[in-house]
Image (cartoon, grey):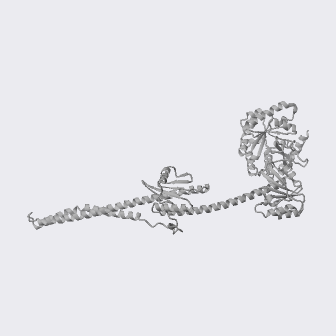
């Protein structure tokens, strides 16, 4: 029995009883570097290791078959994801946010309930899904990929990336309809580690390179062990590589100091190191990410003003004693309003407690011992930069809030003026009073204006400087009347309504002020339109009332004249009958009968006069009601503006 099989048999009972309960496994990480610049780490691959009582650690080849046979793969995978996101969170506190690849068995993607649990764990974590790449092994059958397709699509849809490890079956990958989901193709060592099959391996690599190009995927070589292999792979278009050549798998905290990782903060960062012969610059440059600029200055004769002019994002002072010159500079800087203490660090070889006190008194953000591990040093630098960024953000927010408050006060004052203007317009009884209210408001804002009112064929105009608009200015209103609500030309703007228009002749140059004017003049013209329409209607009703009153008086006169004429006719007939009774040879009884008959006939037909009189009375009542409705009231006085008419003269 081989040693690996023996280890598997020995681990069986341990796995069943204690492994899942105690979580006696951990992750190590191997760097993935850019093949063009191996010092640039583009990602890491998480590798599972098991720690047992009988041996320090074991390869997955020993214990994974046991997990698979016992159906524990889903549980193990979810626990592995928990450890991965925990490691990533710890790493991110130092400012590093690496892309991490983890291998998950392809068969697990057939179980959608498992995929839901996996995504739920990832979404609850602080690790963005875009930072995770899931690595699967190229299957021997297309059916296996198709069965896993639904689960793979869920993971891709959530934002994760997908890598596939090549096995030499490139034809299967070429025939897979969903191959566009692949973000990375990984080439194991057997493709480039055997010089005897160089031509065949070269053909395989070129074929996978063609597939990667067709789906816009990266090509990564796994297991690179020499510079010759690195150069060979680079010549075939491989993008990145991992292997012992670039570092053995290790915990994140043990990554060597020559690794340059991607950071969570802005890489365009200027660090100024004020030296005092401690040699910290070499260490600093070795582990800082690419993009950081480290400037070294001698602090012996440096002043606080000169340090401010360096415009550093981070200041690091080397010190060797509490009375060091650096602390004098720090004391001077701490009194400056234009200096942010969160951007200062002190580094020293000594662990003297008095240094801690001096750092606190000088307002230093943090103290770094020169022997401090790289990850801790990076964490302090990251926190300092983040604190500086937060302070700047708070300062900017305070400034923005102050500007917003001032603008709100200006807007409120302007709003109050517009309200007063609209009150004055609503209280106006004619075009001149509307114009006067408008010109008063414009005068308060140093604006010149003119206004035109249209009532059918009647045009009335006023100008804030002259009595009326000049003919050329009236031509401008006529030409621009159909150009829309607002029409700007030069430093002027015409505001058109239905019944009136006004022209502002001297718009300010400031775009913000001009924008405010454009906002409120649209509301002003609507108010002017509405008020002028009411004035026109009131004038029309008033004229109608006058006409009705004239008609009513005429009707009354005619009815009275008709009544008098009827009475006169009765008197005349009675007189004539009385004078001519002897000619007609009538008796007294016959004469009286005839008089009564005529009077009765005329009186019986007086209903027409009564009806006319009733219509006249109704007409007079209607006229009285209309008169009351159209009777002008005194203009309403605007609150706080009793001397409204005395402030600004119209002309």
Relative to 149, residue 595 above or below: below
- Tell me if residue 146 can be seen: no
Residue 103 in the image, given as x and y percentages of width and height = 80, 43
- Is residue 421 rendered to the left or right of residue 543? right
Residue 384 in the image, given as x and y percentages of width and height = 79, 57
- Is residue 429 rendered to the left or right of residue 224? left
Residue lying at 91% horizontally and 41% vertically, measured from the top left:
3
Residue 609 in the image, given as x and y percentages of width and height = 26, 62
Residue 228 in the image, given as x and y percentages of width and height = 87, 37
Quadrant where the N terminus sits is top right
Residue lying at 45% horizontally and 63% vertically, measured from the top left:
429
- Is residue 631 rendered to the left or right of residue 5? left
Relative to the observer, which residue lies in front, 100 or 565? 565
* Residue 368: quadrant of the picture: bottom right
- Is residue 489 rendered to the left or right of residue 398? left
- Tell me if residue 199 can be seen: yes
* Residue 173: quadrant of the picture: top right
Relative to the observer, which residue lies in front, 480 or 400? 480
Q: What is the number of callouts on the image?
A: 0
């Amino acid at each position: 029995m081989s040693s690996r099989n023996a280890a598997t048999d020995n681990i069986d009972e341990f796995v069943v009883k204690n492994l899942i309960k105690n979580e006696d496994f951990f992750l190590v990480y191997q760097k993935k570097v850019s093949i063009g610049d191996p010092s640039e780490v583009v990602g890491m691959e998480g590798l599972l290791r098991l720690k047992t009582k009988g041996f320090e650690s074991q390869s997955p080849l020993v214990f994974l078959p046991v997990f698979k046979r016992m159906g524990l793969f889903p549980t193990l995978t979810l626990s592995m994801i928990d450890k991965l996101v925990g490691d990533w969170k710890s790493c991110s506190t130092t400012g590093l946010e690496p892309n991490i690849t983890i291998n998950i068995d392809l068969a697990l993607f057939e179980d959608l309930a498992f995929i839901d649990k996996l995504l739920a764990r990832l979404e609850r974590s602080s690790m963005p899904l875009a930072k995770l790449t899931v690595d699967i092994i190229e299957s021997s059958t297309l059916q296996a990929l198709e069965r896993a397709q639904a689960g793979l699509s869920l993971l891709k849809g959530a934002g994760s990336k997908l890598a596939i490890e090549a096995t030499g079956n490139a034809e299967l990958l070429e025939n897979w309809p969903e191959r566009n989901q692949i973000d990375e193709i990984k080439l194991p060592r057997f493709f480039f580690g055997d010089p005897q099959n160089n031509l065949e391996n070269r053909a395989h690599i070129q074929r996978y390179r063609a597939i990667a190009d067709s789906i816009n995927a990266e090509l990564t070589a796994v297991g690179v062990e020499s510079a010759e292999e690195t150069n060979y792979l680079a010549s075939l278009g491989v993008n990145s590589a991992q292997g012992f050549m670039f570092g053995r798998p290790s915990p994140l905290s043990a990554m060597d100091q020559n690794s340059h990782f991607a950071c969570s903060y802005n890489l365009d960062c200027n660090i100024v190191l004020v030296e005092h012969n401690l040699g910290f610059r070499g260490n600093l440059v070795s582990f800082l990410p690419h993009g950081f600029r480290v400037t070294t200055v001698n602090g012996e004769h440096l002043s606080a003003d000169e340090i401010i002019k360096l415009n550093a994002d981070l200041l690091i002072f080397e010190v060797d004693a509490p009375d060091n010159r650096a602390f004098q500079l720090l004391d001077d800087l701490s009194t400056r309003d234009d200096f942010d203490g969160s951007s200062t660090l002190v580094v020293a070889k000594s662990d003297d407690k008095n240094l801690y006190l001096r750092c606190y008194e000088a307002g230093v953000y943090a103290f770094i011992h020169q022997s401090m591990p790289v990850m801790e040093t990076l964490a302090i630098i990251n926190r300092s930069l983040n604190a500086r960024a937060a302070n700047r953000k708070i300062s900017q927010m305070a400034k923005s809030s102050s500007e917003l408050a001032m603008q709100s006060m200006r807007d409120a004052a302007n709003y109050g003026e517009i309200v007063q203007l609209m009150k004055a317009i609503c209280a106006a009884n004619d075009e001149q009073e509307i114009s006067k209210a408008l010109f008063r408001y414009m005068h308060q804002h140093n604006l010149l204006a003119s206004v035109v009112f249209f009532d059918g064929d009647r045009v009335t105009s006023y100008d804030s400087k002259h009595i009326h608009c000049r003919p050329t200015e009236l031509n401008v209103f006529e030409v621009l009347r159909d150009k829309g609500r607002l029409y700007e030309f030069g430093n002027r703007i015409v505001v058109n309504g239905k019944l009136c228009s006004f022209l502002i002749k001297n718009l300010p140059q400031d775009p913000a002020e001009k924008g405010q004017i454009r906002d409120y003049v649209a509301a002003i013209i609507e108010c002017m339109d509405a008020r002028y329409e009411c004035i026109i209607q009131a004038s029309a009703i008033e004229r109608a009332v006058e006409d009705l009153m004239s008609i009513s008086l005429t009707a009354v006169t005619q009815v009275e004249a008709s009544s008098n004429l009827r009475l006169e006719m009765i008197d005349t007939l009675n007189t004539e009958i009385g004078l001519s009774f002897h000619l007609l040879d009538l008796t007294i009884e016959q004469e009286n009968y005839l008089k009564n008959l005529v009077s009765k006939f005329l009186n019986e037909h007086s209903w027409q006069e009564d009806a006319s009189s009733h219509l006249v009375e109704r007409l007079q009542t209607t006229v009285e009601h209309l008169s009351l409705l159209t009777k002008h009231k005194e203009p309403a006085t605007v609150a706080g503006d009793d001397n409204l008419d005395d402030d600004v003269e119209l002309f």
